[in-house]
Amino acid sequence: MSDFNTDIGPLLADIVEEAGRLVLPLWKSGLTVHSKADDSPVTEADRRGELLILERLETHFPGVHVISEEDASEFGTPDAVGERFFLVDPVDGTKAFVRGDPNFTVNIALIERRRPVAGAVCAPASGETWYTQGSQAMKRVVGEAGKPVQARAWAKGAAVALVSHTMKEDTLKALADKYGFNATSAMDSSIKFCRLAEGAADVYPRHGPTMEWDIAAGQAVLEAAGGSVLTPEGEVFVYGKADEKFRNGWFVARGK
């Protein structure tokens, strides 16, 4: 059993990497895609990855509540949750996964008092993992030791926004006018938070629906790297919204 008084970020990194190794052979494999109740896709990779993560978390942190995407989709979310719980997304960016795009991730975050305090995000296709360690954000690539990463200061005149592939042109223009970025890069999943955390981009404005498990691990990493995730009004972004079935409102993720 692991101790919450110790730094659990590296352990979460180990778990997401193990799950990543499990789901990676199913990428580009022509696996069957099923529809969930909300018509979003789910694959055998999601299900297998979630089962492994749930087993590992129960081994290391017995009795701690875990809210995971596929379980929540099948059985619903709890009506209440305590001050400490895990959020799990075994394959974030399932649509990207299905179409063969490498920008899908495996995510675990620890929430305490409504805030993400530790997290890990693995991108199995590229062999990259970002995670919290103490007060730092770290990145490691398969076969290499972890190294600290930091968000960059706003690149005035050359600021890059990360957006989804499906964003419409008029929406993109409205966001550029509001947030003042100069260029965009389209990608799926929580990897957008990690690119901000390592200083590869400047802002990720999300004026659309997400769930808590989609972004919690990415937020933990980004904040440890010196970035922020706030509401568009500049308010703190909180978790444990059981009364809203763990749905998120709009947010803006930024580097420094």
Image (cartoon, helix red, strand yellow):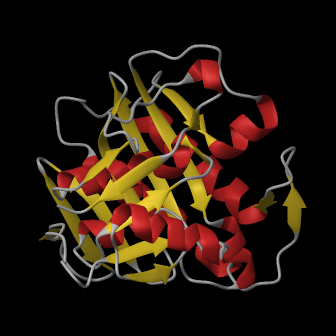
Q: What's the residue at 28%, 55% (across, down)? A: 221
Quadrant of the drawing holding the C terminus: bottom left
User: What is the quadrant of residue 111 in the picture?
Assistant: top left
> Would you place residue 145 above or below residue 90 in this image?
below
User: What is the quadrant of residue 37 in the picture?
Assistant: top right
Query: Measured from the top left, where is residue 202 in percent x and y?
Result: 28, 70
Q: What's the residue at 51%, 61% (across, down)? A: 106
Q: Is residue 21 visible?
A: no
Q: What's the residue at 73%, 82% (across, down)? A: 99
Q: Is residue 206 visible?
A: yes
- In the displayed structure, does residue 227 sit left or right of residue 122? left
Given residues 100 and 19, the one toward you in this image is 100
Q: What's the residue at 35%, 56% (across, down)? A: 253
Query: Measured from the top left, where is residue 50 in percent x and y?
Result: 62, 50
Query: Measured from the top left, where is residue 96 in percent x and y?
Result: 66, 75
Q: Count the labels in the image.
A: 0
- In the displayed structure, does residue 156 sit left or right of residue 88? left
> Would you place residue 256 above or below residue 108 in this image?
below
Query: Measured from the top left, where is residue 243 in percent x and y?
Result: 62, 18
> Would you place residue 226 above or below residue 70 in this image?
below
Quadrant of the drawing holding the N terminus: top left
- In the displayed structure, does residue 58 sit left or right of residue 43? left
User: What is the quadrant of residue 166 in the picture?
Assistant: bottom right
